[in-house]
Image (cartoon, helix red, strand yellow):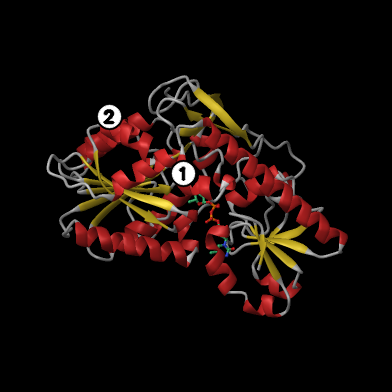
Amino acid sequence: MPQDSSREIFKVESCRICQSKDLFTFLQLGPTPIPNGFLRKGQLNMPEKFYPLDVCFCQKCTMVQLAHVVSPEVMFKNYLYIPSTSSTMTDHFTNLAQTLIQESKLTPSDLVIDIGSNDGTLLKAFKSQGIKILGIDPAKNLALKANAQGIKTIAALFNKNIAKSLKSDYQKPKIITATNVIAHVDNLHDFFEGVSLLLEKDGLFVAEFPYFLDLLKKVQFDTIYQEHLSYLSLTPLTTLLNSHGFNLTSVLKIPVHGGSLRIFATKSKTFKKNSHIANLLAKEQTVGIKDIRTYLKFRSKVDKIRHNLVQLLWELRLKNKRVVGYGASAKGNIMLNYCRIGTETLDYIVDSIPYKQGKYTPGMHIPIFAESKLIADQPDYAILLAWNFKEEIIKKHNLYRNRGGKFIVTIPQLEII
Ligand code: DWN
């Protein structure tokens, strides 16, 4: 259903892939504030907007999706997530560009368009190899930053109309990439009509997104939030791609963001499929993505994580232990709001991003400081709220741990390291 941009939120009446109305809500995490909506001190006493966070699955095509859509205007107009703040993601995107240049035999006359290009981290890697690039991103603050660094970026939310205007102003791209984007798109049919219009006839569409089977297996419920409208698996995605004349040619499981999929799709008539596709589709069936019991089991695992975490923090408080948070991430804010963990439990959160330092987390209003405070203050425990960077973060803090400091990891299960 096309979004009425004048409305801030609306309820999903039918599946965004197959239009079925048979949507089963299996988890309710809300209401919560937008998890990237960090507050300045002066905003703490002002009214804060909370939005529902109900998750449902389509009993016809198995697409897992939020039951409400919050306007992209609310979420992306001033977007604070920047992948280049972590070496994990910078390395990841450099490798992706090199892989695509080699496998697609790109030459300097070829154009690559990145939808949801953010601060241009991926496009910089293509540009450094002499490939023509163009970014599209709805966040004006990020487009400004990317253009200032010589990464041509159009500040717009990609759709069929944008594709039409790009088609008249630019050559057809040989590759269109979309990393951590399609899960954020409400009108997926309009999106893929745009990709289909823009892409070179035998061109390649490459997308990356957190994989729903990883979310299910590792109980990554804190990655469920308003900007992630869909939680993608291959079964419904194949239905969607096929309906726009695309065929999956390859899929690859990758470790970023707790476990993601990289998919390759083309409209070319001459294509080879790799065997992983059939294997993963079969695995989705055996895991039971069509079975309501799968989702009810997931819900009880989520409640167990909440119970165990709150219980542990209570015990630590009774022992007068000092606990802080590490990584003011969107997922961390979902965890904190769902478990009602506030400044009564966490003194503060440390984070490497200057944007976030000096601000407060949405909903629970926990103050955010630079990472250096962890060493200066040496609290007893730090809850790792950015578990997707567990290795990178813990590797930095031998001194903190050698002095007796401990990290609490919550996902996929509670552990103290
Ligand atoms: O879809 C999205 C996924 C891909 O990532 C976006 N919607 C938003 C984002 O989710 P997030 O906010 O959970 O992002 P991060 O990048 O997982 O958050 C990590 C946080 O941890 C950042 O605020 C930076 C911080 N950090 C840190 O303090 N020290 C990160 C590293 C690597 C560090 O060493």
- Of 367 and 270, nearer the camera is 270
Identify the residue under disc 2.
243
Q: Residue at x 68, y 80 (%)?
A: 402
Residue at the image position 39 percent from the left and 46 percent from the top: 116
Q: At which x and y percent is residue 180?
A: 42, 48
Helix, strand or loop at mark 2: loop
- Quarter of the rendering containing residue 266: top left
Quadrant of the image containing the N terminus: top left
Marks 2 and 1 in Cβ contact (< 8 Å): no
Report the image quarter containing ligand 1: bottom right
- Residue 397 in percent (x, y) is at 62, 74
Q: Amino acid at mark 1?
A: Phe
Left or right, 153 with respect to 337, comes to: left
Q: Residue furthest left?
A: 270
The front one of 23 and 196 is: 23
Residue 15 in view (yes/no): yes
Q: Is mark 1 within 8 Å of ligand 1?
A: no
Q: Residue 93: which quarter of the image?
A: bottom left
Drawn side of residue 88 relative to residue 175, left or right: right
Above or below residue 129? Residue 330 is above
- Residue behind label 2 places its C-beta within 8 angstroms of ligand 1: no
**Dot 1 lies on which element?**
helix
Among the two numbered marks 2 and 1 on one chain, the one whose residue lies closer to the N terminus? 1
Left or right: 331 as drawn, with respect to 185? right
Quickly name the residue at label 1. 212
